[in-house]
Image (tube, rainbow, N blue to C red):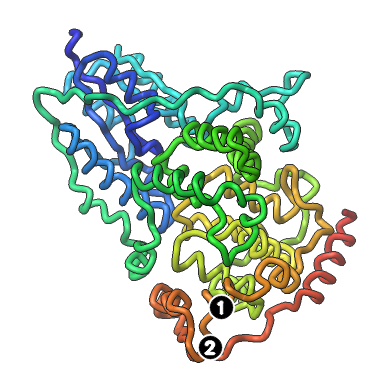
């Protein structure tokens, strides 16, 4: 061990240089720093769109690093422990740093990595950065965890959030670099098929784009955020979920920008801050009750007779944006073309699937896992369970969103529906036509198809759902 032994910085969902505690700590030592990304079994399990978007992010960050005299070392294998041990042997590194993640599988992997490295005499350090508040640090007055959002918000809203760190002035390079895989050989976009070309123009890639996106929102969007965030036909949200998901921007950076906007008197800023804390709340719950990821959070829902067939005709109509309900179909098509979906649309499509179609939220959760470029394990799980009524702080089981009246309320002039639905239109919007370029060919869908009648009407679906709930004694 010497003062010049390299430090491996293991990048994961923290694809940025600024406000990166692990990278800053490594660079502050003055020792050589070797950035690393490992394509292990957990990366391999990602759905089509999240894996493709991750690949884009890795490639972009590598170019940024090369512009700073550094580079990203890529390795692929089943086991992160084995890959890190190999890199330690090849580079003489005595330390491995990384940013913490909080889903159960990653925690188990990282715990094993840390213990194995320490047993071998290698220092292993994890740092915060993906969240503003570590989940175990926020407690109720009795020492438990929060199960309801509003008290969680009231507790953390006045807690100091760390000031974002600047990017390192320099990233010291090693005397020689270890071998690296070629990112193209990983084929991270293979499962996207022809959809990748359609979705790509909607991607805002990398740290600089994320910072510019935040800047535009704070300058021109945050003041009216509270009113506009529910209008899917307007560009009324920050759209930062894509970049937050992969850590191309940190929540700390977003929080401090929101706080400055609040101090400047921009009325929507507090709502924006609350949305950042809603994300934190999802991670808080995932940490304390990891069953939220794959089980009904409310145990009384365990015996509910959901449809659990992902190939059921009703489910396939939902996936294809062919339910005959314009708000649902528009949102599902937006998802396929852009890789994202407006927040109001997410609530409507989730409510329709779980309540009108009485389909298990896990089917919707899995579809989003495959299709979202802003996929986030905690937010996705909590959002689906909130909509289904089975989760924490959930919409009441008896509240069944009417997608027709919701469209009248939030898309009065049908700007959103007309942007995404082509059937029956003499001059469809170009984005509506892109949907047919993205979908699998075996769906055999064309813009000249007749728009379908509703799979289940809002009234019939609501009646059926309430009867099912009553029979379960809810």
In the image, residue 52 sits, relative to residue 210, either above or below, namely below
Q: Secondary structure at mark 1?
A: helix
Q: Residue furthest top?
A: 2
Task: Write the residue at 56% across / 89% down.
Answer: 424
Mark 2 and mark 1 in contact? Answer it, CB < 8 Å. Answer: yes
Quadrant where the N terminus sits is: top left
The answer to whether residue 231 is left or right of residue 244 is right
Kindly tell me whether residue 279 is visible in this rendering: no
> Camera-side residue: 250 or 363?
250
Asked where in the image residue 152 lies, by quadrant, the reply is: top right
Task: Write the residue at 49% across / 59% down.
Answer: 340
Q: Which residue is mark 2?
A: 425
Q: Position of residue 418 (x, y in %)?
A: 56, 78
Asked where in the image residue 67 lies, by quadrant, the reply is: top left
Quadrant where the C terminus sits is: bottom right
Asked where in the image residue 466 lies, by quadrant, the reply is: bottom right
Q: Residue furthest front?
A: 264
Q: Residues within 10 Å of mark 2 (few under 14, many from 20)?
A: few
> Camera-side residue: 189 or 141?
141
Q: Position of residue 368 (x, y in %)?
A: 53, 58
The answer to whether residue 361 is left or right of residue 180 is right
| Residue 418, numbered circle | 1
Total marks drawn?
Answer: 2
């Amino acid at each position: 061990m010497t003062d010049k032994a390299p430090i491996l910085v293991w990048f994961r969902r923290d694809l940025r240089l600024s406000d990166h505690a692990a990278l800053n700590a490594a660079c502050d030592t003055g020792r050589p720093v070797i950035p690393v990304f490992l394509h292990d079994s957990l990366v391999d399990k990602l759905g089509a769109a999240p894996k493709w978007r991750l690949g884009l992010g890795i490639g972009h960050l590598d170019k940024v690093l090369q512009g700073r005299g550094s580079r990203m070392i890529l390795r692929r294998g089943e086991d992160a422990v084995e890959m890190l041990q190999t890199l330690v042997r090849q580079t003489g590194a005595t330390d491995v740093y990384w940013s913490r993640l909080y889903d159960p599988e990653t925690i188990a992997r990282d715990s094993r990595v840390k213990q194995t490295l320490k047993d071998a005499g290698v220092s292993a350090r994890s740092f915060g950065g993906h969240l503003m508040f570590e989940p175990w640090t926020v407690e109720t007055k009795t020492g438990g965890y929060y199960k309801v959002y509003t008290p969680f918000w009231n507790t953390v809203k006045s807690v100091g959030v760390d000031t974002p760190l600047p990017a390192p002035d320099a990233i010291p390079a090693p005397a020689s670099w270890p071998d690296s895989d070629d990112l193209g050989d990983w084929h991270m976009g293979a499962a996207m098929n022809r959809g990748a070309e359609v979705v790509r123009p909607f991607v805002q890639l990398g740290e600089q784009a994320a910072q510019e996106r935040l800047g535009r929102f704070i300058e021109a969007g945050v003041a009216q955020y509270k009113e506009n965030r529910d209008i899917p036909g307007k560009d009324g949200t920050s759209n930062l979920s894509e970049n937050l998901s992969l850590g191309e921007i940190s929540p700390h950076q977003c929080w401090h920008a929101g706080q400055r906007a609040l101090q400047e008197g921009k009325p929507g800023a507090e709502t924006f801050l609350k949305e950042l804390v809603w994300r934190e709340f999802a991670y808080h719950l995932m940490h304390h009750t990891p069953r939220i990821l794959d089980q009904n959070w409310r145990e009384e829902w365990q015996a509910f007779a959901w449809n659990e067939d992902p190939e059921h005709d009703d489910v396939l109509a939902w996936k294809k944006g062919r339910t005959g309900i314009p708000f649902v179909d528009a949102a599902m098509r937006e998802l396929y073309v852009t890789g994202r979906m407006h927040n109001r649309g997410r609530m409507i499509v989730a409510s329709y699937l779980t309540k009108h179609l009485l389909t298990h939220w896990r089917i919707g959760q899995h579809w989003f896992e495959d299709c979202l470029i802003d996929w986030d394990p905690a937010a996705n799980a909590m959002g689906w369970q909130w909509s289904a009524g089975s989760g924490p702080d959930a919409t009441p089981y008896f509240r069944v969103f009417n997608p027709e009246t919701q469209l009248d309320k939030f898309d009065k002039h049908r700007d959103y529906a007309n942007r995404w639905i082509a059937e029956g239109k003499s001059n469809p919007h170009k984005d509506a036509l892109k949907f047919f370029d993205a979908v699998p060919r075996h769906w055999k869908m064309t813009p000249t198809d007749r728009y379908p009648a509703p799979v289940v009407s809002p009234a019939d679906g609501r009646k059926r759902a309430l009867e099912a709930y009553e029979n379960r004694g809810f």
